[in-house]
Image: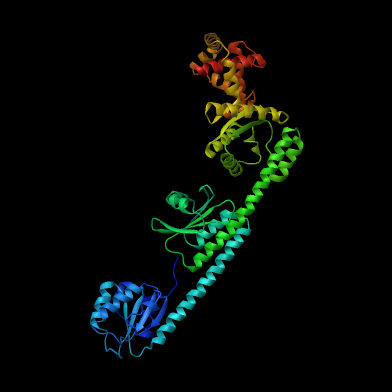
Amino acid sequence: MDNMALTLAALVAERPLGLRVRAAEAGLDRPIGWVHPTELTDPQDFLEGGELLLTTGLALDETTSPEYIRRLVDAGVAGLGFGVGLSHESIPRSLVDTAEEVGLPVLEVPRKTPFIAITRAVSRAVAADEYASLVRTGKGQQELTRTAVGKGGPGGVVRKLAKLVDGWVLLLDSAGRVTEAAPASARDSVDEVREDLARLRAGTLVTSVGEDEVVLQTLETRARGVLVVGTGGPLDAAGQHIVNTAVSLLSLALEQNREHVAALRYLRTGLFDLLVSGQDEIVMSALSTVWGDAPDAPWRVHAFEGPPGARQAFHALLEAETEAHEVFFAHSGTAVIAAAVADLSVSERVVRLAARAGGLHGGSSEIIGIAEFTFGVRQAEQAAGVAKARGVEFVPYADHAGRGFLELVDSPAAQAFSDSLLAPLRHHDETGRGELVASLTCWLEHHGHWDLASARLGVHRHTLRNRMRKVAELTGRDLDSPGVRAEFWLALQVSART
């Protein structure tokens, strides 16, 4: 943050004062906290640091001046103003030399300039600085408050805070994950403060990342979060007040949001129970009323089991990265159930989100209608149980069911059957005249849904229909027959195992 306090250089630039720089000109960028006139040879007990000390050198000479300067440096003064024409016609040489050596700026104050004129100049600057700080604090607090109560939410507060402090800001959840970042590139800085986060229990901790000073401050919420603010230098008083305001607003917003999210999760579970009991009309109406939309059947049901933290993380990802018209999801016992539209890309996204949450084992049902929801849940939960038993992340029910049946079939006989049934299709594909095996597999996986299968293959549905007619022609089998479809599915699964 830019500091508006008066510097030694700015004071020297006020020509009516007639000040001359006699030592350590390189240090004139130091801000002046206050002015303190004294003739004491050791004024350290009366100083806080940052003062411009004024003296006429009444008790100083060439012998005592060097140690006097060193004591001032130890006290942390910003500079020394030495009045000439009273005790001394000129500043002692040893004082100037020592001040140059230790880097303490020395200003020569002419006889015509009273010390009170310097005090007034600094006082005006300090008052102006405090007023500007107060105005900036008030304006910043107003902007943050408007953002918090508007549509910006926590993300808007984080972005606004980053602008107000001219830095970068991260909002972390209780697990140390980034939930908001401004700018987006600030996410890369979270690893730099991991050790500091581990040490932070409550309150504030100041550290650094590269050349930036970083403030970590816990939020006042039951689910502990942390606000991380990085700036090019220490925050001034206004910056600190603005950050504290952001902490209070974010704490309130996140606590309210936590209660709101909890209520919606209870509602989702209640709607899930109604759906299981067959009250699908009520559920679909409620979904459209509360979330503005509902996924159209047919569905593919997913179940993911795991520890509570993983389920909560998965639920949060579903809320953030799926749409109401794509997926309905809810907690049920020790699982999260997600009913997705029968679009394979949506199901794949659900599975990827579960993998991102980590620690979950999941399974999916076959494509079902809304009246078959309970059946789909059982399939998905059974597949999830198989995934957990096998130590894998995900198992589709169709793969589990098919694999279970295949294990009952004599392998040599099954292989011979598969080779015989699929031979005409493979011969056709090898001639480069089509992709019958892949098309048949996809069509069966989508239970004969032409639009879904053709979309997955990236071809027009009429093209897929022509390919299925070719399959029937080459094999002499009627694909409208459930038994024939089952034979083809068995043959394809056996072929995939070899």
Counting labels gives 0
Q: Residue at x 30, y 85 (%)?
A: 57
Quadrant into which the N terminus falls: bottom left
Q: Residue at x 64, y 31 (%)?
A: 301
Is 97 placed left or right of 484 in the picture?
left
Quadrant in the picture for residue 299: top right
Across and down, in percent, residue 102 comes to: 28, 72
Is 46 placed left or right of 89 in the picture?
right
Q: Residue at x 40, y 81 (%)?
A: 36
User: Residue 38: in sight, yes or no?
Assistant: yes
Across and down, in percent, residue 215 comes to: 47, 59
Looking at the image, which is closer to me, 60 or 354? Answer: 60
Across and down, in percent, residue 416 comes to: 53, 9
The answer to whether 295 is drawn above or below residue 213 in the figure is: above
The answer to whether 334 is drawn above or below residue 23 in the figure is: above
Looking at the image, which is closer to me, 175 or 291? Answer: 175
The answer to whether 422 is drawn above or below residue 207 in the figure is: above
Looking at the image, which is closer to me, 341 or 39? Answer: 39
Is 195 placed left or right of 220 in the picture?
left
User: Residue 459: in sight, yes or no?
Assistant: no
Across and down, in percent, residue 291 comes to: 68, 44
Q: Residue at x 31, y 76 (%)?
A: 71
Quadrant in the picture for residue 265: top right
Quadrant in the picture for residue 90: bottom left
Task: Work out which residue is located at the far front of the displayed protein and give it.
Answer: 45
